[in-house]
Amino acid sequence: MTSSLHVVHYLSLLVLLHHGLSVPQPEQVHISLTGDLSQMQVTWLTMEPVSGQPYVKYGRLEDDLKYKNPGVKDSFTDNGPQRKVRYVYTAQMTNLKPDTYYYYSVGSANGAFSKVFKFKTFPQGEFPIKICIYGDLGIQNGQFNDIIHGKEQGYYDMIIHVGDLAYDLFTENGDYGDEFFRIMEPVTSTIPYMVIPGNHEQDVNLDFLHYRKRLVMPGKGSALHGLYYSFNLGLFHFAGLNSESYALSRTDETIDQFQWLKQDLDKTTAPWIFTAIHRPMYCSNSRPWYDPSNDCNGSDNIAIRVGDGNMPGLEQLYMEKGVDIAFYGHMHSYERMWPVYNKVAYKQQDRDRTYNAPTPIHVVTGSAGCHTPHTRQDKNEKWSAVRSDDYGVTVVHLYNATHAHLRQFSTEQHADVDQYWLIKDEGYRPGRQP
Ligand SMILES: *[C@@H]1O[C@H](CO)[C@@H](O)[C@H](O)[C@H]1NC(C)=O
Ligand SMILES: *[C@@H]1O[C@H](CO)[C@@H](O)[C@H](O)[C@H]1NC(C)=O
Ligand SMILES: [Fe+2]
């Protein structure tokens, strides 16, 4: 009895000493859009608890972070054998002026503060923007160096990650997730990092634990948990969706998402509409080691395209609402389709330029690098326009309301393997004419 009490006291003394001696450092800093361009969301982690109010300090001068907003503290326990607890902090920088550099640092009243990071707010109104978009970026084979280099070179202003992070965020008691956000910090601390869930975010209890806790996407506070959301940014409207409600046959969630998307797309007046969902409707991949059929002929892909039982599919809605480009990951390769609807391809004169596209353009961009490299694309579907098995990322450059340019950068060749112009008349929406 006595000795066990001693053990308890000794342990708590050790814990106290440990905390007293090593101040937990804020780490894995990443910023994201809230939907309000006068705000920027910042999220960070500590591996040990910190008492005291978390803060973001920010300002327009590096040596004068004169604004200070309180943040919110949260923690979660990973389901791995070590049951590791992580402490997550979120705060918003507010009243930001457009087109302006801001410096910021995050930390807690009784703890350490991070180094000072810098980002630039977006301009007001419609402005040209470059978006890096990819899926399926793993600790193993992830093309991190090129993604970081591209950010440093100013090749893009933000990132959209269309699901499958780290492989997986919870692997090795969640250490993979920490490693992933540490590697990405030079990028994600300085340009907005927007994410949608993929199958690898389902987590061991199918509750998207690490995704929900580590990432703050618009609508996180609501019942949607940031699993699907939208935002407007200058020339474009982006709607990010959760494919896993289809894959897990969660009918009610899928119906809710569909109804939400319908209303969301009805409201938007942005010149360009982009959507993303992890699992593709169209692709030319196959899994010859166990299934000779087309990968996009799977029940998940079919459900997402045309529905399954009471779960409504998305292709018709995309068409009716005039989605310009629909992005996907999941297949570990790059593929751009000809205009296609209901499995009918509308081949154009020019492979690398479409004017007033009759349908949404479907793009699979899942080649950012992961443990199962180079998914074979050997089906050569008739809607397939351009394919690349190289590791790489997609960069969309919106020039104005009529001209969008898309390129696929191969990180293996250090060259573009697709260059594509999507051009339209002002106000044109695909799918509105036969
Ligand atoms: C797609 O799957 C169906 C059965 O679900 C099968 O009959 C058909 O041949 C498949 N098509 C391709 C192209 O694999
Ligand atoms: C839109 O951008 C394209 C590509 O830079 C350019 O050729 C075109 O003139 C621009 N249109 C307008 C209205 O500025
Ligand atoms: Fe996936």
Image (spheres, helix red, strand yellow):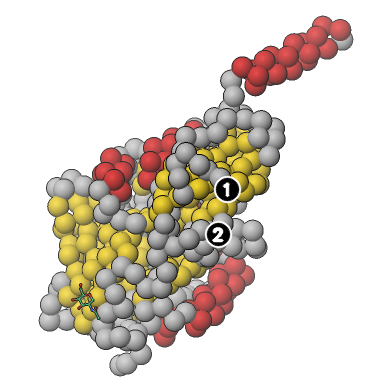
Circle 1: residue type: Tyr
Q: Is mark 2 within 8 Å of ligand 2?
A: no
Q: Which residue is mark 1?
A: 67
Q: Which residue is mark 2?
A: 95
Would you say the residues marked 1 and 2 are in contact, meaning their CB atoms lie under 8 Å apart? Answer: yes
Q: How many marks?
A: 2
Indicate the quadrant where residue 1 lies.
top right
Q: Earlier in the sequence, mark 1 or mark 2?
A: 1
Using the numbered discs, state the Cα–Cα distance from disc 1 to disc 2 in whole angstroms. 10 Å
* Residue 18 relative to residue 398: left or right: right
Residue ID at (62%, 70%): 252
Which residue ends up furthest to the left in the rendered image?
Answer: 349
Q: Which image quarter is the C terminus in?
A: bottom left
227 lies above or below 88 = below
Circle 2: residue type: Asn
Q: Can you give x and y, in whole percent of width and height, for residue 186 in the image?
A: 38, 41
Disc 1 is placed on an element classified as strand
Which residue ends up furthest to the bottom in the rendered image?
Answer: 434
